[in-house]
Image (spheres, rainbow, N blue to C red):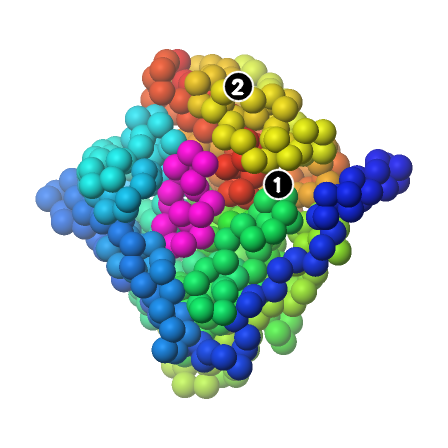
Amino acid sequence: MKQSRRNFIKSLSVTGLLAPLATPLLAKNTAVSLNTFVVPALDRGVRNGNNVTFKLAVQAGKTSFFQGLDTPTIGINQSYLGPVLRAKRGDTVNIQVNNGLNEVTTLHWHGMTLPANMDGGPHQTIQPKQTWLSRFKIRQEAATLWYHSHAMHKTGPQVYHGLAGMFIIDDEGSDKLGLPNDYGVDDIPCIIQDRRFNQDATLSYMSSMPDRMMGMQGSIVLVNGVVTPTLVAKESLIRLRLHNGSNARTYNFAFSDGRPFHVIASDCGFLHKPFQTNKVRLAAAERVEILIDLSDKKEVILQSIPSANGGMMPMMQMNNKTLTIMKIDARQAQTSTRKIPNVLRNSKIDLNPKVVTTTRSFSLEMGMGGMMGGMMNRMGGGNRGGMFRINGKSMDIKRIDFQVKANSTEVWEVSNSSMMAHPFHVHNVQFRILDRNGKRPHPSESGLKDVVLVPPGEAVRIIMKFPEYSDAKIPYMYHCHILEHEDQGMMGQFVVV
């Protein structure tokens, strides 16, 4: 391992990858951020019984992240990001997506169980000036999901410029738990993204080789499109729906005074019981819901603190710095009538290892051989020599990697032979983590998930049951959710039959 690490660093030096990561070109004294916390617009659609219709317009625009300066961005029904969509289990949603851009895009319903042709992956393209209808029934439990571009080779830049939003599912039991549930008052969505800006306030994207290798990272943090905002808390017990909407960064969330909080939900729904901790790790695309007690009526800062597992190596990643995410001002908070429950719920999804029919292995790989060609080409032609691979293969949209059976239960072992962590995502399923290198997962990961972070040298086993939807021709995706890795080939396809 030491020898391979030396060779790896030597090869990086040859290609100039050890140059310092680019810092924001926008000097702090040249612009003033607009840092009032913004609650995203809530869109419940137009309801007719259990049928709910949403109309979404993907559009280019300009957003003022800094006073007096406009940044070209992409949004949904607005200039940057999209509204929070909200529907209930049992609803049939009809989502009309109009593409107002001058390039192809998609909208993928991340974490949703649905037919393959409604998934919004790279096969469900929306041409410029065209409209796509995605229609499906919501069958899963209450959860904080999200939606974003999944266009082939363009996911990274489109999401980076704002093409994403949150999707909240409620169910018949979620409101009975007594949790904070007043949207924007004590139940607050937080889409957290790191960005890098040029001197003219334009977004800087893929400006160096490390950006391609590690994914886009920046030192300016946005929450709901606002630079390090201040949330004025109205209640003494608040629920934050934290979503890592960054392209690549892994966060290690903690409060500046070290105060504990309770984790109540992960990617796809509630934990069985609240778990108390003072920090929680969140990789790209992961979500977590937490409860914070602010009865002391103080000001506190949500931070991302250094993490040993967040990236490749100290000189080549930015996860070893403390970042300010946002400030919470609880000085005027009223005493909440809500309580932290002792028990949340048991999921009805049965993931029984005794009925597993198939075990599959996946190796996440970054190879230095043929790096330049693999990183620069467009992986549409059966590329096997790219830098970013799964099981030795880079993404080929014409290749189906394997079939699974509807209603079957499988175990996937995902190992990481590279020297940086990768968040692994599977479409159309909610899985549980069985173990990490044979050890039980952290309690905050005990719930249903759709993304799992796989650090270097680790093997993670996950168990999932594939829903009844089947389509022998249209595939679902599995991939690294560092978007630049996905765009450059760390992705594969499977069909359900």
Q: Is residue 153 magenta?
A: yes
Quick one: quadrant of the C terminus?
A: top left
Q: Residues within 10 Å of mark 1 (few under 14, many from 20)?
A: many
Q: Residues within 10 Å of mark 2 (few under 14, many from 20)?
A: few
The percent coordinates of residue 175 (x first, y second) are 32, 55
Quick one: quadrant of the N terminus?
A: top right
Q: Quadrant of residue 482?
A: top right
Tell me the kind of residue under disc 2. Answer: Gly
Magenta span: 148-163
Q: Quadrant of residue 415?
A: top right
Numbered mark located on residue 382 in the image: 2
Numbered mark located on residue 50 in the image: none
Residue at (41%, 74%) from the top-left corner? Answer: 66
Is residue 348 in view from this perspective? no
| Foreground pick, 211 / 314 | 211
Residue at (72%, 48%) from the top-left corner? Answer: 16
Residue under numbered circle 1: 422
Is residue 158 in view from this perspective? yes
The percent coordinates of residue 245 (x first, y second) are 47, 53
Asked whether the beta carbons under mark 2 and mark 1 sit within 8 Å of each other, the answer is no
Residue at (44%, 68%) from the top-left corner? Answer: 201
The percent coordinates of residue 362 (x first, y second) are 62, 25
Label 1 secondary element: strand
Q: In the displayed structure, would residue 383 be above or below residue 3?
A: above
